[in-house]
């Protein structure tokens, strides 16, 4: 690492990734669930991402919101060069990528009056001086009523991992190798300590969490992830109360969590825990106590500069305009939710009609309510509950500007380019933009190939044939249920099952979200 990185890993690029909780519609919904005036009234807005990495999330937001202007900032020139090239190839003219450090932001007069500023994977990985510089920038750069979204490793949830991370960092300092190789060497060393009875670094089950890549990344990508997560010199999980105190200097008030289910206290705490929490004054102490009860290791905090509490009537008026698009078939709907407070059961008599309505087509929350009222349903959940539960359990996608048919060429061109890393076998996941959702979706390798041929307007039978021909080239082993499979017939059968599922379940969804013609 060199001095310009301020102790942050810079010898390997951060992995590309799309984070839906940073998107405007998701943030708007979180504010409304908690009863605060959201920052946006339409799809014309200014958005800034600090620490944008390879620019995946920022580019998705720009491609899905052609009326918006997006500014994406990162200190790593490799990230910015790659992001600029992809944006140029995709014809994105409403996004700019800037190579700037946090202390260079402060005096940039052009970086002002943002509706939304987001930071993912930044706040607890940088020095206090850099956090101070960010606060100064936010004080100057966020307009009144504007929103700031910050995600970070949180205390006390990381308490048990502190000795592990420190040993990993200290051992990695003994090597001059690349960061991804150093982190693997550090894991091997800690493995030896653990087997010799050093439980300070965690038991075998604890240690296994770091060895496993959870079948979502290659071994190489997992090493890169671990290096960026744990080898930064200023790695420091933070208490929510301290983050609130720092951001108060920029006149920012905490209003909600971008982890939507966290906004429903009865899903997070037992009745007894809620009684203790509610006995405290409103403010940072309540949130901190929640973190103690649930041992929360990661927070996605939303702040507003000049937060305004709104009436229930105003909240329902704004919620009623938001649409929902179903991500599940009614037969696959989840009625039992695992939460920190235990299992919660959705009343099937109340929610099954909602799943059935959304299976027909996307609908606004007001449409859903009116349909349920017309059907004389005895009990109807509140609009905030319907949206929060369905989006929070990944069973629906919010459509912040309602239902429309506004496809655009830029989104189509962006998606054609965004799919290429999967087609070139450079990545097992890609993210594509949806004009209807003003957001995006992550696609796995099989879905990416199916999307590619569906975008050519092939019939389903052709999509099946072409996708299987493409996926079986080279007969590489694949992972099925955690096991490496080498037999060609078994590989083909598994791939065919995945392709058929995507044809049946994903192509209709992509068409609904205006991602396909």
Image (cartoon, helix red, strand yellow):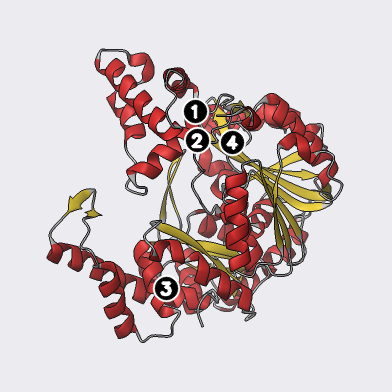
Q: Position of residue 335 (x, y in %)?
A: 41, 57
Q: Mark 4 or 2, which is nearer the eye?
A: 2
The answer to whether residue 276 shows anywhere in this view is no
Residue 454 is tagged as none
Q: Residues within 10 Å of mark 4 (few under 14, many from 20)?
A: many
For marks 1 and 3, the one nearer the N-term is: 1
The residue tagged 2 is 228
Q: Residues within 10 Å of mark 3 (few under 14, many from 20)?
A: many
Residue 451 is tagged as 3
Q: Mark 1 or 3, which is nearer the eye?
A: 1
Q: Mark 4 or 3, which is nearer the eye?
A: 3
The residue tagged 4 is 152
Residue occupying the point 19% across, 63% down: 491
Q: Secondary structure at mark 4?
A: strand
Residues under numbered marks 2 and 1 in contact, where contact means CB atoms less than 8 Å apart: yes
For marks 2 and 3, the one nearer the N-term is: 2
Residues under numbered marks 4 and 2 in contact, where contact means CB atoms less than 8 Å apart: no
Out of 379 and 381, give the one closest to the viewer: 381
């Amino acid at each position: 690492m060199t001095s310009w990185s301020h102790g942050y890993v810079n010898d390997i690029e951060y992995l590309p990734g799309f984070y839906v909780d940073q998107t405007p519609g998701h943030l708007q919904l979180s504010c409304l669930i908690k009863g605060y005036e959201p920052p946006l009234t339409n799809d014309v807005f200014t958005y800034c991402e600090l620490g944008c990495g390879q620019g995946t999330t920022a580019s998705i937001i720009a491609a899905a919101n052609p009326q918006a202007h997006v500014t994406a900032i990162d200190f790593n020139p490799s990230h910015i060069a790659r992001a600029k090239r992809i944006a140029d190839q995709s014809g994105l003219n409403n996004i700019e990528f800037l190579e700037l450090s946090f202390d260079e932001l402060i005096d940039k007069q052009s970086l002002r009056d943002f509706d939304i500023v987001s930071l993912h994977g930044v706040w607890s990985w940088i020095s206090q001086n850099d956090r101070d510089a960010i606060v100064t920038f936010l004080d100057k750069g966020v307009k009144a009523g504007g929103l700031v979204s910050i995600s970070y490793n949180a205390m006390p949830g990381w308490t048990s991992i502190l000795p592990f991370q420190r040993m990993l960092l200290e051992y990695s300092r003994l090597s001059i190798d690349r960061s991804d190789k150093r982190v693997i060497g550090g894991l091997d060393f800690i493995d030896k300590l653990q087997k010799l009875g050093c439980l300070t670094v965690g038991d075998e089950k604890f240690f296994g969490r770091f060895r496993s890549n959870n079948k979502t990344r290659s071994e190489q990508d997992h090493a890169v992830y671990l290096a960026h997560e744990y080898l930064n010199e200023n790695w420091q999980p933070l208490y929510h109360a301290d983050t609130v105190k720092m951001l108060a200097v920029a006149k920012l008030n905490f209003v909600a969590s971008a982890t939507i289910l966290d906004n429903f206290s009865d899903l997070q705490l037992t009745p007894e825990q809620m009684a203790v929490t509610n006995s405290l004054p409103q403010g940072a102490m309540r949130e901190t106590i929640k973190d103690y009860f649930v041992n929360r290791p990661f927070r996605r905090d939303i702040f507003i500069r000049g937060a305004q509490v709104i009436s229930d009537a105003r909240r329902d008026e704004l919620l009623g305009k938001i649409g929902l698009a179903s991500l599940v078939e009614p037969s696959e709907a989840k009625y039992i939710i695992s939460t920190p407070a235990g299992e919660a059961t959705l009343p099937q008599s109340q929610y099954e009609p909602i799943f059935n309505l959304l299976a027909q087509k996307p609908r606004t929350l007001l449409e859903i309510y009116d349909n349920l009222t017309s059907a004389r349903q005895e009990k109807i959940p509140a609009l905030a509950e319907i949206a929060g539960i369905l989006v929070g359990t990944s069973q629906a996608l919010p459509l912040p500007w309602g239902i429309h048919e506004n496809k655009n060429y830029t989104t189509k061109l962006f998606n054609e380019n965004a799919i290429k890393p999967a087609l070139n076998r450079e990545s097992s996941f890609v993210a594509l933009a949806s004009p209807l959702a003003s957001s995006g979706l992550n696609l796995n390798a099989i879905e990416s190939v199916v999307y590619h041929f569906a975008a050519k307007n092939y019939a389903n039978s052709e999509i099946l044939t072409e996708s299987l021909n493409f996926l079986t080239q080279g007969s590489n082993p694949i992972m099925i249920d955690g096991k490496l499979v080498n037999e060609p017939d078994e590989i083909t059968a598994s791939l065919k099952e995945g392709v058929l599922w995507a044809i049946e379940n994903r192509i209709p969804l992509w068409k609904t979200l205006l991602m396909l013609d």
